[in-house]
Amino acid sequence: MRQTGQDLTEGSLWKKILLFSIPLIVSNILQVLFNMADVAVVGRFAGPMALGEVGSTTTLVALFTGVLIGVAGGINVLVALYYGAQNETETRETVHTSAIISLLIGLGLLLLGGGFARVILQLLHTKPELIEGAVLYLRIYFLGMPALALYNYGNAVFSATGNTQKPLFYLMLAGIVNVILNLIFVIGCGMDVEGVAVASIISQYLSAVLIIRALFRSGESYGLHRKYLRITKDKAKAVLGLGIPSGMQNGIFQLANLFIQTGVNSFSATMVAGNAAAANADGLVYDGMAAFYTACGSFIGQNYGAGKTDRVKKSYLVSLAYSFFVGTAAGLLFVAFGPRFLSLFTTEQAVVEAGMKRLTIMGLSYGVSAFMDCTIAASRGLGKSIVPTIVVIMGSCVFRIVWIYTVFAHFRTIESLYLLYIFSWSITAIAEIWYFRRVYIKTLRR
């Protein structure tokens, strides 16, 4: 088998996991910054109404893209497993089956999101004055779902083989194009929500074309070849078995967040604005930490496939240490420089003070989430997805809803609402660690 990707089964794990993760950190944070740029352009140059129309679709977009990210996670684990085992046939079948599945899921989401955009937005109680623009934005945006699915697929394949630089380069190029087109369409052409949506799908197709083209031209053992493009039944079952539970987990997270937002909305408009401003920190921290979760799954997959169980455990512990450090350090920085960060989004001191209530509690809590998310990634790296998903749904989704109707309903303070995060992360982490330990022990006995 031609092993021209990065071998994750040899060498210092501390060094390799860090070097593997740095491009992913940059890539993830760039995506957050590009999304912020989209919001800034439409908010500053198209007006508050357009900003509200785009903003009202955020949860729904996250719900659908979460499915794609979940499926890509399953692809990443399987490719890493077979690539680490140097099994060319299994790697080739997984890569080609996954390409078709990803495209089909992207097309399915296009039809579902585009066809039922209005119905779904009405179910989410979108304000009547915003719904027309929100429907227009979604119907255009969802035209890019097949492209988004293929980019996530390509990113998963390259990451599984140790190449995180190539997807980063394509993302940077597409992101720059997106920002430029935003400015051209919104400022130059006088468009509003449709301009931002069109710019988004053009950049998505650009990144998809570039990464799929790279796979076709690679000549690697994990490259794409037209003659092998077909669905292999057992590989399709494996990809969906790992990816769909993860996608469902992402979707249910968004549903749980709707209940949290309802709790926030019970306070004053100033508190709601402060919460919205402070929430911008979440994406920057979570996505920085998520790079190490991807590394965890990729390293565990390759080493498990290669039969190196000692490096499986160490890959988990090293990834956990890095992600905990990033979450804790970033959180403390946001606490220390919170007012300056919040001033990027508001000039009102009352909003800044309200935002600091969230930023302080979250900033001191981010690191705890690493114990939950990194352990989930480790279990999936060993091919286990259903139980970790059930645990996280119960611990971090159902628990949050129960908390809102009990603890928060009793105290009715914003602090009692925000504290649900660290408590839900903690109890979920304990259960996930217990499960991973059991799976790891069984793996050693084989």
Image: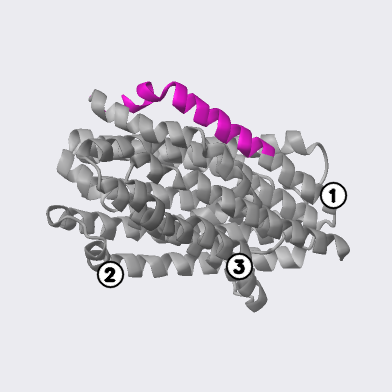
- Using the numbered discs, state the Cα–Cα distance from disc 1 to disc 3 in whole angstroms: 24 Å
| Disc 2 residue type (three-letter) | Gly
Can residue 267 be seen here?
Answer: yes
Circle 2 packing at 10 Å, graded few (<14), some (14-19), many (20+), is some
1 or 2: tag closer to the N-terminus: 2
Residue 187 image position (x, y, % from top left): 20, 35
* Extreme residue in the right direction: 445
| Disc 3 residue type (three-letter) | Ile
User: Which residue is found at the position 22% from the left and 43% from the top?
Assistant: 51
The image's colouring method is one colour
2 or 3: tag closer to the N-terminus: 2
Residue 216 image position (x, y, % from top left): 59, 56
Dot 3: element: helix
Q: Left or right of 260: which side holds 243?
A: right
Dot 2: element: helix
Circle 1 packing at 10 Å, graded few (<14), some (14-19), many (20+), is few
Dot 1: element: helix
Q: Which mark is residue 310?
A: 1
**Quadrant placement of the N terminus:** bottom right
* Residue on which the image places disc 2: 115
Vertical relation: 328 (above or below) 73: above
Q: Left or right of 183: which side holds 305?
A: right
Discs 1, 3 touching: Cβ within 8 Å: no
| Disc 1 residue type (three-letter) | Asp
**Quadrant placement of the C terminus:** bottom right
* Residue on which the image places disc 3: 386
- Point out the frontmost of discs 2 and 3: 3
User: Which residue is found at the position 81% from the left and 60% from the top?
Assistant: 441
Looking at this view, is 147 or 427 the one in front? 427
Rendering quarter of residue 215: bottom right
Vertical relation: 305 (above or below) 267: below
